[in-house]
Structures are given as structure tokens and as C-alpha cells.
Amino acid sequence: MEAKNIKINIPSAATDLINKLYDAGYEAFIVGGCVRDSLLGRLPGDFDITTNAEPEEVKRLFKKTVDTGIRHGTVTVIESGEPYEVTTYRIDGEYADSRHPVSVSYTKNLRDDLARRDFTVNAMAYNDRVGLVDAFSGIDDLEHGILRAVGEARLRFTEDALRILRCIRFSSVLGFGIEKSTADALRELAPGLLKVSAERIYSEWKKLLGGKNAYYVIEEYRDVISIFLPELSDVSLPDRDSFDKLSVENRQLCMFASIGLEGFENASHRLKMESKTRTKGASVLKNLIYSPNPSDNELKRYLVDNGDEISLDGAEISAAVGITDKQTYLRMLSLVSSPIPRKISDLSIGGRELMAMGVRGEGIGKLLYALLLEVAQGNIRNDTDELLLRAQELL
Ligand code: ATP
Ligand code: MG
């Protein structure tokens, strides 16, 4: 269970923190995702620490601490300016609501703490004194790229349904396969996800969408995803190459392209997506390019009407799902990087000049738009005299 020969580089502040706990007579290890990521050669997001010292003892030992999750045994220690979550070895009690243990109790045994963790690859601890503590053969699963529940998968997914989504998220992000009994259990128990909060679902879903293996996981586990995104149950994905190139937001939008605006708005509301994602997503979906091979003038009008960001995303998604040609996106890219005027403020004249000509109210905006379109499409030059002349003609 312990491997002395494995060495992980721990930030020096975390090493100091661990040493202080040992000096006071306790044990301490880095644990979970940071051990997994370090062994995979990935940069860990944060280094979590597990210890047999209880929170009050941790607080006594360190000058700067914050009670971030004291009810679950977690204290954040600020060591050399860096925050570390230090959690007491813990056993989770009964789970009441498919998500939260009713009670947690402390234990002096590291193995018990590792046993409450979700997957074997997330259930390893390490420090420089002891080496790797791997009570559930996480290192073997890591080497083979396998996600396997710690203990009985059905029980673990029943206790906390979020683990179902974490499992397919890790499969997407790490490119790991899911061991059969774990995969069977997560499919069977996927309806439990309905009890998980929208915020947690959406945060995992975004990570899943951004994973290198997202395409495969979305295809393979569509039944699981459909529990929280029923809109997407029958959607077909674009070809993998096009999908893989898209940003997280555009991967999501390309799945909604065939569903339409209403489906997206329902889903984004239900999952409490950020307002920027919602409004931008709605604009893109309202303005997909359905023409297979739009003319230059059509593309320029689209750019004037929608601005750079929506135009690029709209063209990229439309091309990915095949409602416009792949070239359309490349043409839009070169339009956006060209200096052509596409905003009213790019014009050499403004409202003031038109008012001097006697134009009033809504007419000003309409006329400026008409002039801008002509300039963008190359019918007239962006030159004050030429614009004023053309304005006269249009009046
Ligand atoms: P990430 O790269 O997203 O941070 P992570 O594995 O570090 O992945 P965290 O949410 O930071 O995920 O959790 C840290 C550790 O806590 C996990 O590696 C795992 O050991 C344990 N853990 C987190 N969530 C759960 C859960 N729902 N059930 C059981 N163990 C969990
Ligand atoms: Mg983490």
C-alpha cells in the first residue's frame, strides 16, 4: 500500500505545512486530485492536505487560518501567502439526500479517509516521508487509464449522485475509460442526478464539455447527460474534428443548433448558466448562417448586424454543424481581421452631420446603418464628402 520510490514535487509552502504538522506529532499528506495530476504529469489546480490533526489543533498550530468548511473538518491554512485546504481524516456518515452526508466523523486512520473518496485514482495520498499511500490500487488504474469507484460503485453513486457526473467528467478530461461495473452503476443510477443542484451539475458539465475526450463521452453517455439535459437526447454531433476545435461554449451551442433557441433558453435557465453565456448563446443561435455558400455581401451584412464576436461564433458553429460551408468560417475570420468598417462609430460621419442635414429621431440611426452597410460592402468609400452626398441621395 505504500510506495517509497515514487517522488512527487510538492510546493515548498505545502512541504513546510506538512512538516509543521509532523513536528507537532501529527501526520499529513497531500491527497486526491493533486496526487493524481502530479503522477500524470499534469499541473495540479491546488494541493489539498489531509491530516489526523483535528481542525482546532490545526488552527492552534498555524497563525493564519480561515474556517472554510469547519463542519466537514476543513480549515484553510495560509502558508507563505498560499492557501491550503487542510482536512481532518474523515469518515462520512449516512447520506440523506443523494448528495450530503448527514454527519461526518473524524478518524485517526488515513485508509478510512481514502475509502470515502470517489475513484481509486483520487484516493491516493503522498508525502516525502512515507511516499505514496495507495490503499485501493489507484496507481494501477492511473497507469491503465481507468476510473473505478472506491468500494461498491452502486453504493457510492447512491450516496452521492454528483459522483456519477464527476466520473464521466474525469473520463472526458483525462481521456480515461470507465471500469465496467462502475460504468454500469452510473448508467443505472443516473436519475439520481436530478437531486444534484444546478450549480454543481453545470460546473461539472462545463468541465466535461472542455475535455479532450468530450466527443466520445457525450456520444457514449448520452443517456446520463440526458438526465439533466433532456433537450440533447437525440442531437447528433458534428464530425469529431470540427467538434474538437470548438471552445467549450461553442461545443455546447453546436449541440443546441438543431434544437433551437427555446430549448437552449430552457436549459440555460434550468442549469443557471452565466448570463453572458445565456445572452451570447441566444444571439448566436438566433443568427446561425443557413446559406451553404453566402455571398461576400451577405457575410458583410451579417458582420455589421452582429459584431465580431457573434459573427465568428455563429459562422464557426454553422460550419461545424454543416448548415453552411466550412469556407464560410474562414471567410468570416479574414473579414473580422480585415480593417473594413463595421460599426457606426467606424464611419467618418456621425449623427451630428445628419442632424445638420435635417434628419431627426430614428431616421438618424437608420441612415447611418444604411451608409455603414454600403461602406462595408464597398459601394462607397468611408469619406466624409462621399458619405454626405450618399446620405442626401438616400433621404
Ligand atoms: P479537480 O481537478 O476538478 O480539482 P479533484 O479530484 O481535485 O479534481 P476536487 O473537487 O478538488 O476534485 O476534490 C478533491 C478530492 O476530494 C478528490 O480528488 C476526491 O478524493 C475527493 N472528492 C471530491 N468530491 C468528491 C465526492 N463527491 N465524493 C467523494 N470524494 C470526493
Ligand atoms: Mg481539486
Image (tube, grey):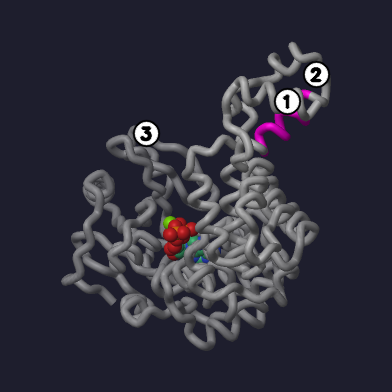
Mark 1 near mark 2, Cβ–Cβ under 8 Å?
yes
Callout 2, which amino acid? Val
Residue 234 in the image, given as x and y percentages of width and height: 72, 77
Q: Which residue is mark 3?
A: 64
Which class describes the residues within 10 Å of circle 1: few (<14), some (14-19), or many (20+)? some
**Residue under pointer 1:** 391
Q: Residues within 10 Å of mark 2 (few under 14, many from 20)?
A: some
Vertical side of 386 occupied by 120: above or below: below
Residue at the disc numbered 2? 359
Does residue 53 show up magenta in the picture? no
Residue 306 x %, y %: 66, 44
Can the viewer see residue 205?
Answer: no
Secondary element at image label 2: loop
Q: Is mark 2 within 8 Å of ligand 1?
A: no
Hey, what amino acid is under mark 1? Ala
- Range covered by the magenta-colored residues: 364-373
Tell me the CA gap for discs 3 and 1.
Answer: 68 Å
User: Hey, which residue is sitting farthest top in the picture?
Assistant: 356
Membership of 368 in magenta stretch: yes
Say whether disc 3 or disc 2 marks the residue closer to the N-terminus. Answer: 3
Q: Is residue 304 left or right of residue 69?
A: right
Question: Which dot, 3 or 2, sits closer to the camera?
Answer: 2
Of the two numbered discs 3 and 1 in the rendering, the one whose residue sits closer to the viewer: 1
